[in-house]
Amino acid sequence: MANNKKIDAKKIKNVPHITSFNKNKQQYNPTIFPHGIKVDLDHADFRRGIEITPGTAPPNTANKLYNDNGTLMFNGSNVGAGAGGGASAIGWQGTAGIIYQTGSLGIGGVSDPAVKLVVSGTSTQLKLSYDADDYATFAVANTGDLTISTFGAGSVDSHLILDVDGNIELNADGGTIWFTDDLTTLGRIHTTALDINVGIDVDAGVNAIDMLTDYPYAGAITLTSQGGTGQTIFIRNDGGTRTDAIKFQTDDGGITLDANSVVVVTEGAKFGIGTTTPLTSFVDIQDYDTTAFTSQLSNTQSGGHVLKCGSGTTVAGQLYFLHTDGSWDSTDSSSVTTGADQLLGIALGTSPSSNGILLRGYARIGSSMINGTAAIGKAVYVSETASEYDFTAPSTSGDFVRVVGYCVDKDATPDILLYFNPDFTWVELT
C-alpha cells in the first residue's frame, strides 16, 4: 500500500467480516480483523481508536499487539490492563526509559496528585532494591512520621550514608533530635543542650562514643556554652550519683583543663595546678602576684588541705586544736593543754564536719585576730588570746611557743595572707 493512504475496507479480501466505509461523510465505521492485521506504513492515523477484542494469545506473539483475555500484550509481555478488566501489572522491556513530559503521577488511589509524584498507602510506600535481599524502604505513618529502613542479606549490616557536597542540616523546628540504638536512647539534641546518655568504656570499646577529629578537620573537639558568661558545661556519668567514673584518655600531649591554664595533666603523669609545664609529678602554684590576695580571698577565707571531721562550733578564720574528745577547741598559748602538741587548724565555717578545717594552705586573716606588728616574711605564733594569731612570741612563764606559719603579704588594714603550716615542735617557757 502507498504511504499515508486510507484503507478502503471494500478492497480488502479474505476476511470473515468487513464493515462498510462511508467516504462522503468522512466517518469510519468499525472494521473487524479477527485473524489480525499487519500495518506496514510510515504513518497510520486511527482517529476513532482501536478496539482489540479479548481472546487467547496468537500462536506466534513476536512483534504483535494483542488482548490476552483482558491484558494488553506486546511481543509476549504485559503493557497494560485492557478493557476486559484485567489487573495484571504493567511491564516494560528494552533499554529506553519512560519519559513523562507534563503533569503529575499518582500511585495507590491518588486521583489528583498535587506534586510530580505521589505514592499513597497505609504501609511501606516506597522500596529501593539492589536485589531481593538488599534494599531500603520508606514508610509514612498516619501521623506523618517518616521511617527510612535499610535491610541487608543475612548478617550484613546495612547503613544509611549521607554523602553531600555541602552541609547536612537537621532542623527539628523547636523539637528534639533523638539518637537510639533500637533498644536504648543514646542521646538527644534539643533546644537548650546536647545530651549524651550512654555508658562509656574506652578500653573495651563497648558502647563507646567516638569523637574523631581526623581528615579533613584535624584539630580540637570543642564544647561551647552559648548562654553567655557564667555558664557551665557538665560532663556527668550516671546522673551525677558518683557510682561510676568518667575517664579522660588521650595519646601523647596529656589532658588540660584550661581556665586561664589552671590544671594540666601531661604525658608521663605530671600533674600541674596553675601551670601548663609541670616539671615534677605534682606542681601546685599559688599565684598571689598576678592578682592580689585581697582580690582572691575575702576576710576569713582560705584554701588548701582541708579536713572535714570532728565536732564543736567554730568561727571562720580562727585558730583551733583537736581535743582528745574529738572536738575542735580554741587555742591559747598560756597552757600547753590548748594547742602545744595537738593538731592545729583554721576553721572554714561554723561546723568542722560540714565546712571543714584547714590543716595546711593559705588563709586571709583579718586584722581583728592579729596581735603584734604584722610584717611580711615573719613567723606567726599561737597567741595568748584565744583562737588568735601573734607576731610576737609568748614570753610568760608557763606559756608555750609554737609557730603556725608565715606572713606572705599584708594590706593597709592590715589583713594578712598567712601561709599556714604549723610547726611540729614547740617550747614551754619556765
Image (cartoon, rainbow, N blue to C red):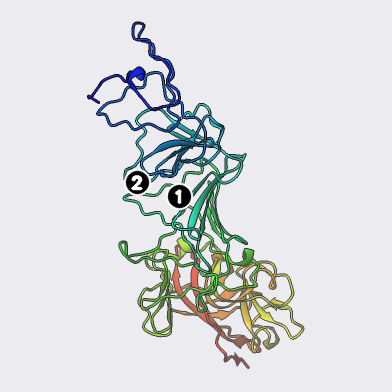
- Foreground residue among 367 and 173: 173
| Residue at the front extreme, as displayed | 14
Residue under the image location 42 percent in, 15 percent down: 29
- Foreground residue among 50 and 422: 50
| Residue at the bottom extreme, as displayed | 430
Q: Quadrant of residue 21?
A: top left
Residue 413, horizontal then vertical, whole percent: 49, 62
Q: Quadrant of residue 92?
A: top left
Q: Amino acid at mark 1?
A: Gln
Write down the residue under mark 1.
Answer: 226
The label on residue 270 is none
Is disc 2 in contact with disc 1, using a CB cutoff of under 8 Å? Answer: no
Residue under the image location 36 percent in, 83 percent down: 279
Residue 249, horizontal then vertical, whole percent: 46, 75
As drawn, is 424 to the left or to the right of 48? right
Residue 304, horizontal then vertical, whole percent: 53, 75
Camera-nearest label, 2 or 1: 2
- Residue 300 vertical placement versus 34 (above, below): below
Quarter that holds the N terminus: top left
As drawn, is 344 to the left or to the right of 269? right
> Of helix, strand and loop, which one carries label 2?
loop
Residue under the image location 46 percent in, 48 percent down: 228
| Residue at the right extreme, as displayed | 325
Q: Amino acid at mark 2?
A: Gly
> Of helix, strand and loop, which one carries label 1?
loop
- Residue 223 vertical placement versus 424 (above, below): above
The label on residue 94 is 2
Residue under the image location 62 percent in, 62 percent down: 183
Residue 406, horizontal then vertical, whole percent: 48, 79
Q: CA distance from mark 2 to mark 1?
A: 59 Å
